[in-house]
Structures are given as C-alpha cells and as structure tokens.
Image (tube, rainbow, N blue to C red):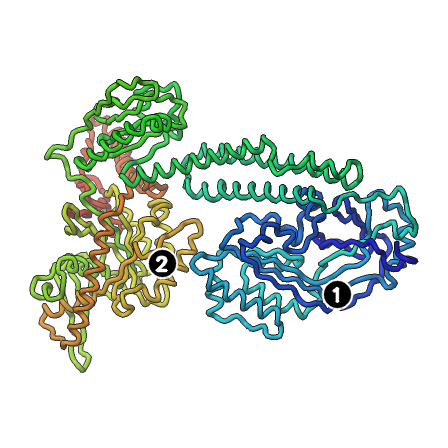
Amino acid sequence: MSDAFGVAQDNIERIAIDQRGSIGSFYDRYEDNIKGKLGEKVKTNFHKINQPMICMLTHGHAPECENLLKLVGINHQLRLSISLEMTRATGIASLINYSQPIDEHTRLFYIYQESNRELTKDHLRHLKNPVRSTNFVSFATHIVTEIIWGFHILVILQLPANQAKQIDVELKKLLESIIHKKYMVQINSQQRTLLDQIVTTTIYSNIDVLTKLKKLEYVYQTIRGLQNNYELHERLKYILTPIEWLYGYYTPNLSKFYLSETEEINILEYYLIQQASELKVLNIRVNHDLFELLQGIYKIQFKKIQDKLTQLQVLHMKDIERLHNVVLNIRKGVILESSIKKEVSLDSPKEIQQLNTNIIIDIEHLESKMKLIKKLKDAGFEYCDVEELGIQDGLTTAKINDVLFGTESNKVIFFSNDTLKNNDQVGWTEFYSQMLAEKEKNRQLHLVYADFTYSTYKLEKMAINSSEDMKAYQNSPNSQSSKSETKRKAPLPPSPSVQTPLPTNEFINILLLGESGVGKSTFINAFANYLNFQNLDDAEKGEPIVIIPVSFMMTINDNFDEKLIKFGEIDSNENHNNSGQSVTQQCKSYVFKISNGKKLRIIDTPGFGDTRGFDQDNLNMEEIFSFLHNINYINGICFLFKPEIVQLNSYLKSCCTQLFDYFGQNISDFFIFCFTNARSTFFAPGNTRPLLTTFFQSFLEKKIPFQRKNTFCFDSEAFRYLVAIKDSMNFDPNERNEFEQSWTRSVAESERFRDFLCTQHEYRKNHEWQSIKDVQFQINFMIRPMLETMRNLLRNIILFDHDLSIKLSATHASPSSMLCYKCHRNPEKFNQFWIIQDYLHNSLNS
C-alpha cells in the first residue's frame, strides 16, 4: 500500500484500446472495460516524455506474427479479455479481425511513440474524497490515475510476389527515415511507383484518421506530421490504481483478482489463437478462393458449404462463451485457477472438429470437380450440372432427354456421376476417349458431359446418348454389375454427308476493332502478305495479296512532295476521301486461308472515334452487333492500337462496356491486342501499354487479360514499302535494309499470331455468348414482321366486305445478310400501298 496516498505500489497498465477513458474513469479489471467516471471534474497536468520511438519491420513468417496482439504490446490479461470477447476489440486491438492470411508476402510495419504523461496535480490525493463518497466498488476494481499519450500504428502490407524484394528495400529506407526523423524526406516518383504496387494496405491505430488511409505513402507523410504535433496524439496507455488504495485501508469486501500468467493460461491463449486462425483460413478458402474458382457454377453446393461454415462459426462462439465464463469466474475467485486444466486443451471440441473436417472434404470435392470441368472444356466438352436444370427423381427418360437435348441435332451427351466414375475409372476413360475420337472424325458434334452427381435422379449406368435416335448406348458396368459383364461401345451418330454444310469451326472468326485511322484495313492486308511471303525478297518477286483496297500518302523527294499510293481495286466500302472519318464504312468480313483446314474470317469494322461524334460511333456499334447476329460464334475480339499514343480514345470505355453488355462478362477472356507501326518501339506495346493497364483496372468486376500470349506487335510500314515499290517508287539501300528487317520480325509475329488463333476456343452463341443485349437484337428483328402481319390482318378485315384479301408471302433472306442502320429508309409505293423497306447487305464472305 502507498504511504498517505502517494504513489500506489500495485498499479497496473493497460493499452488504451477504448479512447473514452480519462483521469478519474473507473475500470473493471475482470473484463477490462471502462465503467464511467467521477462526476467531479479533475484538474490534470501534462509532462513531456522523452522516450525513443519504437519502429519495427517484421516479415509475415516471423514467430511474433502468430500473436499480433502481443506484437503491439498488449499484455496477456487484456489479450485474453479481447480474445474471449469480454471487451470490444476497438482501436489498435481491432487487428484481431484482420481477414487476410499472413504469409511470406506479408509485411508488418509497427511504430510506437510516447509523447506526454497526464496526471492529477497532486496525484492520488486529489481523487481520495470523490472516490470515498461514492460506492463504485460494486462495478469497478480500478480507477484511471495516469494516461500516457502518443501514437502507435500497425500497418499490414500484402506485397506482390514478383516485387517483394524491391519493396522490402524501400520499406527499410522508410523505416530508417522515420527513426532518424530529422532526415525524413519526400518520397520520389520512382519510390511511389514501386510502393503503388503493394496489393493491400491495412492500418490499425489509436488515431482514427490513420485507419482511413489506403497507401503507405500517406501513412509516412502523416507520421511526419504526428512527430511534431502533439495535439494530434491520442491515449496510448492507462495507469490503473486499485480503488482500495483510495480508501486508505484494506477492504475485505473489495474483490481480489485471481489469475496469473501460468502455463495453463498460455495454453488457453494458444488455443484461442489457433481456433481463430483456423476459422479465418477456412473463411478465406470458402468465400474467396472457392468462390473465385467456381465462377458462378455449383451454386447449390457452394451455398451448402457456406451454411456449414455459419454453423461452425456458431459453435466457435459457443466455445468462446464457455471459456469466457470460466476465465471470468477464475478472475473473481469463484473457482480455482487450477480448474482451467479441465476446461482447456489443445484440441477443439469434437463437434467443431467433425464439422471442420466435413467442410474441408466438401471444398476439396468441388476443387476436384473444377479440375474435371477444366479437363472436359479443354477437350471440347460442354459441362452440364443436371441439378441446376431441375432434373430430379421422378422425371421420365423422355423428359430428361427433352431438357438436355432441346432442338440440337448434333449433340452427343455423356451421362455419368462421380460414383460411377470412381467405381469404374477404366470404363469412364474408354467412353471419354471414344467421344473424342468421334469428334475428330466429325467436327460438327457438340459434346456434352451431363453430371448427375448432385441430382436426386439415380443414374444406374454410364451412358452415351445422341440426339438423333435418343438411344442410351451400352456402358461399362457400375459397382453393382458383375465383373463378367462385357463392355460394349455404341456407335456415335454418323458423319455428315457430302451435302452437309462445312463444319462451323473450319472458320476462325475474329472481330477487329480500333480507332479511326489506326490502320485496320492495312493491317489485314499486311497480315495476309506476311503469312504468304517469308521474306521481303519473295514478296518483291511475287504479287502482293489484295484483301482490301488501301491508299496512303508517301513523301517522294527532298522537297517533301507527296504521292498518293493506291493498292487494289476501288471498293465502295472504303472511303479514303474524308479525313477523320472511318475509312471502312460498313462491317465486312474478309476470308483467307491461314493453315491446313483453317480459314481466317476477319470482320473489319468502322473505326471508333469518328469525327462525326459519339452518335456516329454508337451507330457503328449498332451495325457491328447487327452484323454479328448472323454469326454463331467468334474466336476472339482483336483490338488494334498504335504503340506510341499519349491518350486513349474517349469512346473506348463505351465500346468495351457495350461489348460486355452484348457478349456477356466472360468475353474478356477472348480479347486480343495487336499493335501496328511497332518498329519504332522495337516491336513492343510502347507507351500505350501503361495507358491500357490503367484503363483495364477501371473495370473492377472484370479481369481483362493483357499478357504476351494475347498481345502481338507488327509493322505495317514494311507492307507499305512493298506496295510503294510496286507503284514504281524508289528507295535507297539503307531504307530497304530497315524494311527487310521489319518484314522478318513481322513474319515471325504473324506466325505466332496465327498459331494462337488456331488454338482459340469458340465463344458460342446461346452457350458462353448470352446477354440481354443479344436478346434485344433478336427481338428487334422480330418486331417488323410481327407488325406487318398485324397490319395486314387489319387490311384484310377492311377488304373482307369486298371479297378481297392480301396475302403476305415471306421471302427467305440470305443467312449472310445484315440489316443496315445507316441506309436511309424512304417509303416506296407498291400499287396502292406505301412501304418502308429495310435494306439488307451481304455480310459474310466464305
């Protein structure tokens, strides 16, 4: 006990996780909570503290990262109170709720600085009378008699794996700069670029404004201000004095505190950390990793796993509540401290263990399913979970076939489930291989894997079924079949006859988009010639391939006179006279052979960024979508850019948004990026690359791949040189040498581009290609025929009394025709009727 209420000998310290405390506030040590304060205002003084700043940079794999509360200086009693939810985890203690994994890519940046000590003028004497006059002992054990002011910050960084070493170097520099505060400097642009690569920055502090910051640079700048501005500092620690000291004598009815830092308490804390960590890891695995992996499929199974995870969280809460009561009763002396041995072990309750195991099994099962789906899709199968189609027990075979086959005549379905597959792996593989072999013979086949695993419909055997005769072919025996039963392979539907149209995947369909003037038409010509002529010598000796007519201006002498070079016959679809307007007036496809059995159909489009404004660009997009109405699939959307632009066209955002609306969200996987005139940037994307990278980041919900495998760089100048010499223009040997090198590089890149296109999967309409926008187009095409039919009915009602009628006769339009949105629709008179005609243009070349 202190003498005459000087300084108490049994004071304790607590990190101020609750910022509401002040001198004279009452504190309940049993649960570590502030319980109000004295009604009388207490006069206090501040004394400056000269203590060195504590700065630490810790790697995520360091042992101290296993207990973050301990890392920031919270003692074991308060850590228990926080972990057992006796007190709210606010302030810096809220780090206990950090949701991301702490691993080799994690860095922890911790700063601690004490600045002032606040206490009453005559310390405990000033508090004696107010405390004695009030009965606070019924709800509090201590009173705040001193407050340490300052700031502490924990910054948790998740670094990108490929730049962790470089960022670590900069972090150490910043740490040294903070420690030696007089040398703190501004972050330069190079450092800023590197630090901006940090994946996530999460901040915990006793100063609320710091927790709102999202970049380490801002934290660094704020610390510079905090070091010299004490007015911004907040409560760091409370010094707590037992209330009994203020009574001046021992009070038997004042509760004692029974709970020391024993091995059992350490085991309890370890157990709590372990349980919280396992639950956090499981939550990340379900709601992040598995959610990303599934991409919207297996919704029912995923929901079941989430429900189990919720049950597990409830069990953990009950376990926490049980231990909460045990620790509280020990602290109050109701039960002995030794009894904690009976309540705590390193093993979770059996109910928690079992549910945890079940969730992990379910996750691993779905992960295995996704590997199977990837294998099937890579082989050309469509995967179908029949449960999501409503196929359940009680449906007839005919009804199931109706649901699965629809109206497709070339569909072949593999019926199976996990049990049958696991019980007969050999038989499953034989069926799988048989279907692939038939697909090689008949490219028109649409292979489907119908998975009955989650359906209540009991599938007796694996089977292959075709839409032609709806017969279930004999399959391998299931687990209940006898081993002597012979497997029989059923013949698949026959290949099409000679009269059958060519299979659709003979063509590789590529939609070509780009700004007006980027050189789409020139690119198509250049690409065809690069594939046809391996070097410039061969191209000069041969005849250039003309896919699209092109024209361009070239300087011909020292006076910089210009000559118009034209290549190919005049095409009404190419307008070379209006600068700034798209040269290509309408969508048109151009077909040429690029490999054995493969033809490339490039769909050339009007350029966006037309000088006639956004309305013209929107009209061009409408025409593009009208054109695509006649195409059943595409293999890619190719964006053409120049590598040295300083600003992206403002219409590009609208263009991409409309593409997502029309094709669906997954179309970004089919984006291709080509750069023309790339000789000046050494056949690299140049300054355009960072502009595109920033642009793609604006689509938060979509991941747009922009990597070398889908990026290609060409130089159209070598092709222009070829056209120019065919027009009798002369070049000096040095110029020719440059063009020859450019041709060689462009040939290599063209071959890589060709190989990439030949391996591209189809993005099929009504399968991957599904959107409200496409449905709207289909409905729009139906409106005119329906209205004309209704109008003719009204005409015939009027003509009925005259014993007359008008019969509408539908004429089949060419499948390759498209409705033109640019042609002016003027009414024309047919006999006594005025009719506004729709103008159709031929769109697909073969």
Residue located at (38% from left, 63% from top): 690
User: Which residue is disc 2 drawn over?
Assistant: 651
Of the two numbered discs 2 and 1 in the rendering, the one whose residue sits closer to the viewer: 1
The amino acid beneath tag 2 is Tyr
Q: Image quadrant of residue 297?
A: top left
Q: CA distance from mark 2 to mark 1?
A: 57 Å
Judge whether residue 798 can be spotted in this image.
no
Q: Quadrant of the N terminus?
A: bottom right
Residue 520 locus on image (x, y percent):
23, 59
321 in relation to 99, above or below: above
Residue 471 locus on image (x, y percent):
24, 22
The amino acid beneath tag 1 is Asn
Would residue 115 appear left or right of 45 to someone viewing this image?
Answer: left
Residue 635 locus on image (x, y percent):
26, 47
Q: Image quadrant of residue 152?
A: bottom right
User: Which residue is disc 1 drawn over?
Assistant: 116
93 vs 343, nearest the viewer? 343
Residue located at (52% from left, 41% from top): 282
Would residue 442 appear left or right of 218 to someone viewing this image?
Answer: left
Tell me whether the residue at label 2 lies in contact with that at label 1, contact meaning CB atoms closer than 8 angstroms.
no
Would residue 545 appear left or right of 146 to someone viewing this image?
Answer: left
| Element marked by disc 2 | loop
Residue 90 locus on image (x, y percent):
67, 50
- Dot 2 or dot 1: first in sequence order is 1
Residue located at (72% from left, 54% from top): 16
785 vs 438, nearest the viewer? 438
424 in relation to 196, above or below: above
590 vs 91, nearest the viewer? 91
Q: Residues within 10 Å of mark 2 (few under 14, many from 20)?
A: some
Residue 674: mark: none
